[in-house]
Image (cartoon, helix red, strand yellow):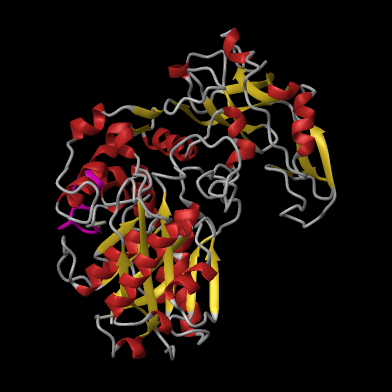
Amino acid sequence: MASETTTLRRPQPLPGRDSAPFWEAASRGELFGQRCAACGVFRHPPRPMCPHCQSLKTEWVRLSGRGKVAANMRPIHPRIPMFDYPLVCVLVDLDEGIRLFSNLYECAPESVENGMEVEVFFVPTAGDKQVPVFRPVRGGRS
Amino acid sequence: MKRNKAVIAGIGQTEFSKDSGRSELQLACEAIKHALDDAGLRPSDVDGFSTFTIDNNEDVDIVRSMGIETLRFSSRTPHGGGGSMATIAHGMAAVEAGLCNTFVCLRAMNERSEARFGIAHMTPTASNKGSGSGFLEWSMPFGAATPAAWTGIQAQAYMARYGLTNADFAPISVQLRKNAATNPLAWYYERPITIEDHQSSRWIVEPVFRLLDCCQETDGGVAIVITTEERARDLRQKPARIAHATQSIPFDTETVTNFYHKDLTVFDSGVQCAKELYGRTGLSPRDIQVGMLYDHFTIAVFWHLEAMGFCKPGEAAAFVKDGNVALDGTIALSPNGGLIGEAYVHGMNLVTEAVRQIRGTATNQVQNVENVLLSAGMSGAILSKC
């Protein structure tokens, strides 16, 4: 398992101007989300305006890193040389109400189920960056 | 009643291959010339044009290659094949508003021999840098770099919700290849498959898509000519009326990487298309005889059937298994073989078949066709007999 989570070949993210704080936090080993500073609603992917109140006031806040698997699949073909296989891709519904695309580790690929409780950790990429990935919460929540 | 009701007066295409051996501009010119010949029009008649944002052909090159005198309206439509029917919507709108009289919709590409879609996309290129998708920034760092992977994760949510396995997709693939087998224009002409063939094909995205769940990569060009119903009366072909055509870009929707709307089991863009198409035309699912449903992957047919009201949410697998999408079924599915069986010209070869079905000239002609639905998710259209 270790080789799957410590690869340095994983390509680094391609941050945009509005999303850079997400990726910068991830590279520090922190999961940050974008929240409207006016109405308090989280949003992802990041964008300059709140779709609920049209405020341009944005704040980046540290997230719980906890959530549930909303969907999962395993890319088989074509294999991408920068990744190790088997590779589990997941959509995670975070407790804060936003959804991330990521990977799931520390779990047998065939035993992944939607609704599974997961928590964030970070893996390195090329360019000395990090990206957020997930693993099952052992024994559920305390 | 609209004054200048838009119709499709001509259709044209090149052969569908895996290596055309000529430029995308040549494919474009050939397809447009065939469509104009079909209608009985000349290049000098053309004054409106649209193609996809991701098509490599420029309108100025089409104009000077073909000897078009002047374009008065030119647009590009977003969202790749999901937006394919937007070319029809733009043509309808421009012709009915009187902005132009003879409108050409085009898609021409060497999508197998040059820039392949099915490969892993790791860096921005002209064909993957956006047009409604956020895949590079949010999926690439996690190893999801193909259309099958992006679509597959949403598909898995649907499968888990309704207890489906990959075997439930097999009848779609078998039906489309059966249709293609009797269509000489299809890449898979005379090459039908069985359920067993589908189930023994290799995994592409586990446990969602096998190879035979995926559409093809194709070299080819398709063109459509739109004009007014009044003018079409003097032209060569029986026109197909554009009952309505629409685009559909609901809140929090993306093209292909559609991960962020609330309920992933709902095909949100298709639902909006259905509201618009049925609402504007007064038609309902029981008025539709043929469904040209954008089948980039088998599961998409389930999504279209449910969004367009042919069955209830979660019932599409049983609906298909019961034979409802056969050529003599409740709603005949892509009689040309669709994108899986005929060719993948990004949805535009669904339009040519829809027109043939309205004209009554298709190889796999469905009986008593009055209305044909074109459903591509981010866009849709209904064609009707005049």
Per the image, is B330 magenta?
Answer: yes
Q: Position of residue B242 (x, y in %)?
A: 37, 76
Name above or below for residue A103 compared with residue B3. Answer: above
Q: Quadrant of the C terminus of chain B?
A: bottom left
Q: Residue at x 52, y 82 (%)?
A: B70
Per the image, is B165 magenta?
Answer: no
Q: Position of residue A83 (x, y in %)?
A: 55, 21
In front here: B344 or A131? B344
Q: In which quarter of the view is residue A29 placed?
A: top right
Residue A135 located left or right of residue B322:
right
Can residue B344 be seen here? The reply is no
In front here: B3 or A54? B3
Q: Position of residue B137 (x, y in %)?
A: 64, 38
Q: Residue at x 31, y 59 (%)?
A: B292
In front here: B61 or B263? B61
* Residue numbers of the magenta segment: B320-332
Magenta span dominant secondary structure: loop
Residue B49 located left or right of residue B321:
right
Q: Residue at x 20, y 51 (%)?
A: B180
Q: Residue at x 47, y 45 (%)?
A: B115
